[in-house]
Amino acid sequence: MRVLAFLLGSLAVATASADMVGQWQGIVALGPSNIAQGMDGDKLLKLQISKAFMKTLVYQLQFNADKTFASKVTGTDMKPRRGRGKYEVSGNLVTLSFTEQDRAVKSQILKGTLTPDGKKLLISMESKPGFPATKFVFKKVDPAAPKSAKSTRH
């Protein structure tokens, strides 16, 4: 009985990892912030410009079967940023361990959660005090879909 339970558990983890393999595209979603309270003039304008810029960014993750991933961030008026690392899947939890960003050594760990249907990956990062957490929403790209259907907006 234990052997069967172990095999079923191993199969579930392997299936979750296999489902990660492929291209994922995402956007950033900013939550409510109390930082704008008391701001005026240039500071408020800079905050609004920053939020508008964040909305133009497109995030891509390529998960490989060998448990490695590559990331790419593109946006208006910016040079693309690229990263690499390894990932782990445990149930619906995904851990991304960056080892490189823009050809420089980088050590950063991000943790995310797969939705129960496995179609979206949600990653949240803490921001500066008073700013909302930065939330990333990734959706797996269907390789069979026509290019026009590969929208990054959810």
Image (cartoon, rainbow, N blue to C red):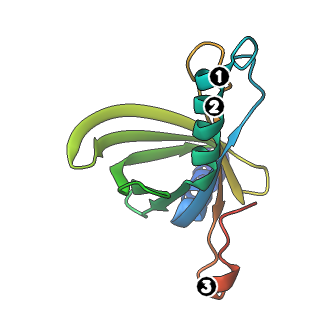
With 12 as the anchor, is 83 left or right in this view?
Answer: left
Q: What amino acid is found at the position of numbered circle 2 in the picture? A: Leu
Q: Is residue 100 above or below residue 126?
A: below
Q: In this figure, which residue is indicated by the disc labeled 2?
A: 45
User: Dot 3 surroundings within 10 Å: few (below 14), some, or many (20 or more)?
Assistant: few
* Residue 18 appears in the rendering: no
In this view, the residue in front, 30 or 13, is 30
- Whether the residues at callouts 1 and 2 have beta carbons within 8 Å, the answer is yes
Q: What amino acid is found at the position of numbered circle 1 in the picture? A: Gly
Q: Residue at x 35, y 54 (%)?
A: 82
Residue 128 spot, x, y in % from top left: 55, 18
Q: In this figure, which residue is indicated by the disc labeled 1?
A: 41
Marks 1, 3: nearer the viewer? 1
Q: In this figure, which residue is indicated by the disc labeled 3?
A: 147
Q: Earlier along the polypeptide chain: callout 2 or callout 3?
A: 2
- Whether the residues at callouts 1 and 3 have beta carbons within 8 Å, the answer is no
